[in-house]
Image (tube, rainbow, N blue to C red):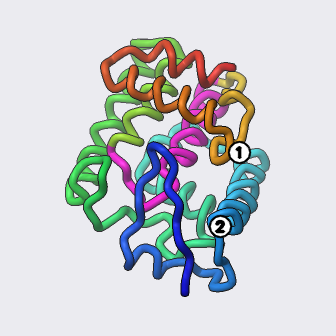
Amino acid sequence: MGLEFKYKNGQTPLDEEEKEGLKIKSITTQGELDEFEQLNIEKAVEWTIHTKLKSENILTEKFIKNLHKRMYSDVWKWAGEFRKTKKNIGIHWTQIGSELKKLLDDTKYWIENKTFTPEEIAIRFKHRIVSIHCFPNGNGRHSRMMADIIMESIFGNEIFSWNQSNMVKANETRNQYIKALREADNGNFNELIEFARN
């Protein structure tokens, strides 16, 4: 029968070929999938804690793909690979590489020129990489981890708390998060920064 996906507000549906990439065939429910993904993500977090991440390596396509792979490779065959399908969000998949390069260059410029506060740089990066939507799935969680890595490894600051909740479960928190993302879409990053801090 296979796994039926239940998508929450703001989540991107997978196409059939992407669903075929599920490595653990015993997964039959969304809850089980969430659990396996969470375990994999925790391993990636451990890796970031125990690895001395060099700031010059973080803002690279290689690092972005590697982090996604570390977060999802136990669960998905395509972990760490840019998507090759059209989605309900994000740019056309053929432009991912060039748009990501622009984002990385912009972020380096913001850092060198102190264009924004460290928090705002991390949040602007997080927001823009989600709007590019590099991967078939896991973009939101990947972008939050990237923002934390930017805060900690580039600026030497505390990571964000992201409302200290499981984004997969907490509907109210998720709605607040989506609302803050919409504000950021319109150029106002204050709500998203506030959300990340709390």
What residue span does the magenta drawing correspond to? 132-155
Q: Is residue 91 left or right of residue 19?
A: left
Residue beneath disc 2:
33
Residue at 58 percent of width and 16 percent of height: 194
Q: Does residue 7 lie above or below 186 as drawn?
A: below
Q: Provide the secondary structure element on which disc 1 rests.
A: loop
Q: Nearer the viewer, residue 112 or 91?
A: 91
**Could you tell me if residue 24 is visible in this image?**
yes
Name the spot of residue 174 as percent of width and height, x first. 58, 35
User: Considering only vertical position in the picture, is 158 above or below 103?
Assistant: above
**Residue 147: image location, x then y, percent:** 56, 34
Image point (38%, 79%), residue name: 17
Would you identify the image quadrant in which residue 116 lies? top left
Count all numbered tags in the image, as a single digit. 2
Disc 2 marks which amino acid?
A: Leu
Instruction: Give the percent coordinates (x, y) of residue 72.
Output: 60, 64
In whole angstroms, how far apart are the C-alphas of marks 2 and 1? 30 Å
Q: Which amino acid type corresponds to the residue marked 1 in the rendered image?
A: Lys
Q: Quadrant of the C terminus?
A: top right
Decide whether residue 153 is among the magenta residues: yes
The answer to whether one can see residue 63 in this image is no
Q: Does the magenta run of residues contain 158?
A: no
Residue bearing the label numbered 1: 52
Quarter occupied by the N terminus: bottom right
Q: Which mark is residue 28?
A: none
